[in-house]
Amino acid sequence: GLLGEMLAELMGGFERRELKPLKRTVFGIEESANAFRYMAQARHIGKVVLTGIAKGVRIRSDATYLITGGLGALGLETARWMAEQGAANLVLVGRSEGSAAAREQVVKLEHSGVRVKVLKADISKGVEVSRMLEALSGMPQLKGIIHGAGVLADGVLMRQDRGQIQKVMSPKAEGAWNLHEATRGIKLDFFVCYSSVSAVLGSAGQSNYAAANAFLDGFVHERRREGLHGLSVNWGPWKLGMAAGMENRDTERIAAQGFMTIAPAEGVGILERLLLQDETQACVLPVNWDKYLRYHYHGAIPPFFKAMSGGSSGKRGVSGEKSAILGKLEGAIAGQRRTVLQYYVQMQVAAVLGEKVPDGIKPRQRLFDLGIDSLTAVELKNRLQSGLDILLGATLVFDYPTVEALVDHLLEELFFKKGPERSSGKRTGMKPGDAEPSLLNIALEEASQDEIARMLATELEAGKGI
C-alpha cells in the first residue's frame, strides 16, 4: 500500500512536470558495442538504453530534427519529448513567430542544452520550403521530420467553399508533399505525419479537415512503397493544442460523443512506441464505444463497429432501451404531446448552446440568431435523432430553423409515420376518400380548451389568424 501511494505521488509529479525523467541515449541492440564504448567514455548524461527492436527509430544527439507546427502546443510538447530522448538540435517551423508562451518554452529548451532554431515559413509553398532547408546549413544533418502543421475552418459540407478547403488542405497536404520533394535526396530516419482520427471516423462539419488528414495517411503509405520511412498517427484530441483552446460547449460535444483526451505524457509515450515498432499508420483514440455509437448511429450499427458494440444489433442505439423522452411522449395524455416535445427540443437547443436552461429560447425565434452554427446544427440533429429514435436529414435545422418548425416536423415524423395505428398514413376512424387531416387540425383535436385559447391568442397577436 505504501509503495502504491509513493508511485502515485511520483507519477503525479511527472504529469505536472515537477519531476522529469532522466535523459536517455538509445542504442539499437545491434549497436551494443558502441553503447558500451559511449558509456565507458563517460560522454552520456542520464541513462544509456539498449532497445531490442533493431529496426526501430532512435533519436540521436548528432542529428537535426525538424518540427512543422513547432510553435503550437503539440509541436512544443513533441520538441520537449525529443529533447528528453537526447535530441540536441531542433528546428521549429511556424507561419508566425509564435506566442509569448511559445517563446518562453523555446528558452527553456535552450537552457536545457538543446540548440533550437525557430524559422518562419509557409510550408505550403515549395520555394519557402527550399529556403527553409538552406537555412539549416551549419547544423548537423537533418535526420527526422515531424509534420504537425494544421489549421481548422469548420462548416458543414454544403456550406464549404474553395477558400475553406484550401485553407485546411494547404498546410497539411501541400506542406507534406513539399517536404517530401525537398528531402528526397536526404536519408531520413523518420518522417512522421500528425494526422487525425477524423480521417478514420469522419467528423461532422470538418470534411475539409478529414480530407486533408486522409491525404497524409495515403501519403505515408506511398512513402513506404518508395522505400522511405513514413508514419501517420491518427490522433484523437489531446489535453493541449486545438483541444485545450476549445470553448466549454465544444469540449462537452466531444465528451458527448464518447471521446476522451490524450494526456501529453501518454501521447509522446505512444509516439515513441510506434517509432520503435516501425509502424506505418496507427489510430490513437481513447473512446467509450457505446457512447460513440449511441451518438452517431440510428438503427443498425455498421459492420466496422460490430466488435466495439459487442455484436449488438444496434436498434435504438447500442443498449436497445427506449429513451426517456419517447416514454414521456407515449405516456402523455391527448393535447400534451406538443408541449412535452417543444420543451424537449428547447432543452436540446440550450444544451448545444452551452446553456443550462431554455428560458431564453422562444418557439418562433430563428435558431441561427440564437448562435446555432453549422457544427451545432449537426449536433442538434444528432441529439434529436438519438433521443427520438427517428432518422433525420442532415439539413434538418436548415430546413426547420425555429423550435416551432422543428416540433411540427418531429410530431409528423413521430406520430403520423411511425405510430402502429397510423402506419398507413391515415388516422384511426377515417373512411375511404376522407381528406388527410392537417397538422393543425390534429393539434387542435388533441389540445385542451386552455391550450386552444393560448394558440388562438398567439396567432392573433402575430396578425395571422387561424
Image (spheres, rainbow, N blue to C red):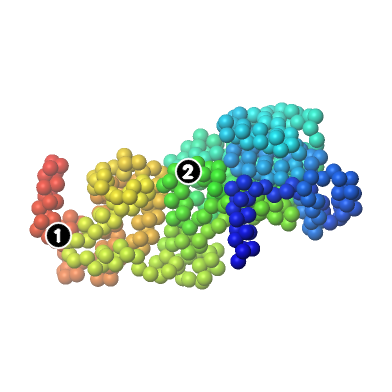
Image location (x, y in percent) of residue 227: 78, 49
Spatial CA span between label 1 and label 2: 44 Å
Identify the residue position indicated by label 1 in the image.
447
Pick the front one: 171 or 248: 248
Q: Amino acid at mark 1?
A: Ala
The image quadrant that residue 104 belongs to is top right
Question: Could you say whether the residue bearing mark 2 is in a helix, strand or loop?
Answer: loop
Residue 264: % across, % down: 60, 49
Residue at 51 percent of width and 62 percent of height: 289
Residue 215 visible in the snapshot: no
Name the residue type under label 2: Met
- Residue under label 2, please give it: 246
At 54% from the left edge and 36% from the top edge, which residue is drawn? 167
Mark 1, secondary structure of its residue: loop
Q: Quadrant of the N terminus?
A: bottom right
Is 95 on the left-hand or right-hand side of 254? right
- In the depicted view, which residue is nearer to us: 454 or 46? 46
